[in-house]
Amino acid sequence: MSEENRIELLRKILKIASVNDKESQVANIIQDFLGDQPNITFKRVQYAPGRENLIIDVNAPTTQKRVLGFNGHMDVVDPGDTDLWTYPPFAAKITKSRIYGRGTSDMKAGVAAMVSALKELLAEDFTFNGGLRLLLTVGEEIDNFGARQLADLGYAKPLTALIVGEPTNHTMWYAHKGIIDFTATAYGKSAHGAMPQLGINAIDHLFDFYAQAKKMMAPILATTDPALGHTTFNVTLINGGNQINSIPQAARLRGNIRTVTAVSNQTIQATLQQAAAVTNKLPKHKIDLSIDSSIDAIASDAHSEIIEIAQAAARANDWPEVVTTGAPTTDASLFKSKCPNLPFVILGPGNNTAHQVDEYVTLEDFNKITAIYKNIIQQYLS
Ligand SMILES: [Zn+2]
């Protein structure tokens, strides 16, 4: 198969505006591209109408001792104001050395590279000594909906190693941070601004919670994780009150915590709950805390077999073999939650233009990562 075919596949899936929807259309293109082949099976797992996860299996993984997994997500983030883009975000505009569009880096180039690697190996009659499983998911950008579903259904269980094709900008990761999103709502009582004694100021009480939470989080933030550094804690949204001359009846803040393996998400959630409970002991305070999303930080051995194979494949393709860690979360957290010992590597084409205007991937990176994936499969399943 030629380079042209790979690029054609990538451009086709880029033209589907799968902004937290329409992943089934991406899956259809991929399934058509691979076509009917002996030893390959396709399975769809529906999340919602028009939104199916696609599982592509080679050699019935549940019957194999050694199974290499690949993971990628088929959804993309919103392009925002399309007027700001040099080329329309879903036109898959190709220039001499780049493809532009929403999802080029994050992460349809990674998905197209793994699918192309598989197709090319099949065309070359490579003997897969073990199983291969591609887990292509929906809704990763919102709350990893698809990966949660597939993990719960046991789809990661047969895997003995996992490659995630998220953009890693010429590095590979053996660990990445986790996340906790939370909302704290303070309830008070409205009153005329001239008679505050008749009301309960929800904004004041929300600040009391915030101060308490910061105090109780301090030792957690001071804990150093040898791989991932520190937990970070940021309030990123706040609103409350109705008008300038009224005592606010309600106020709300939302926070975004980036977690490390040295302090579990569970511990942090318990700390936040405790901060709310302590605040609620103050007179007339009523704070409700909800955890909106929680994804664990993950790490695996930086010298695992799959990392070493990936490094060798990188070397063979003139790609840096830098092994490091990343901040963004991936679907791998959900799969790891069911298979704690699963070794993994995050390695994909793409760069820091993910989630930005004028997102792109270079053709060179896309082609090299396809060759690296092929090489990894050949080595791992030789
Ligand atoms: Zn992504």
Image (cartoon, helix red, strand yellow):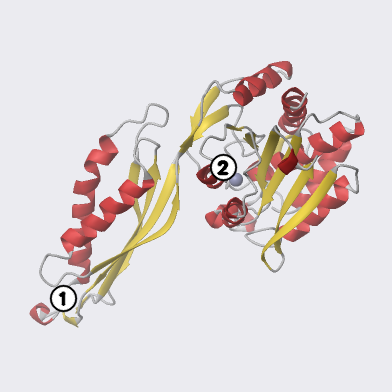
Left or right: 25 with respect to 329?
right
Residue drawn at x 90%, y 43% as measured from the top left: 38
Residue drawn at x 67%, y 34% as measured from the top left: 349
Q: Secondary structure at mark 2?
A: helix
Q: In the rendering, at what x and y percent does residue 152 appear?
A: 57, 54
Quadrant position of the C terminus in the picture: top right
> How would you rate the neighbour count of disc 2 (Cα within 10 Å): few for under 14, some for 14-19, many for 20 or more?
many
The residue where tag 1 is placed is 200
Q: Secondary structure at mark 1?
A: loop
Instruction: Report the amino acid beneath label 2.
Output: Ala
The picture quadrant where one finds residue 291 is: bottom left
- Judged by depth in the image, the label closer to the viewer, 2 or 1, is 2
Instruction: Report the amino acid beneath label 1.
Output: Ile
Mark seen at residue 376? none
- Displayed-image quarter of ligand 1: top right
Tell me if the residue at label 1 has its CB under 8 Å from ligand 1.
Answer: no
Residue drawn at x 68%, y 21% as measured from the top left: 314
Tell me if the residue at label 2 has its CB under 8 Å from ligand 1.
Answer: no
The residue where tag 2 is placed is 332
| Contact check, label 2 and label 1, Cβ < 8 Å | no
The picture quadrant where one finds residue 351 is: top right
Q: Tag 1 or tag 2, which sits nearer the N-term?
A: 1
> How would you rate the neighbour count of disc 1 (Cα within 10 Å): few for under 14, some for 14-19, many for 20 or more?
many
Distance from disc 2 to disc 1, alpha carbons, whole Å, reads 45 Å
Q: In the rendering, at what x and y percent does residue 69 appear?
A: 68, 38
Front one among 35 and 214: 35
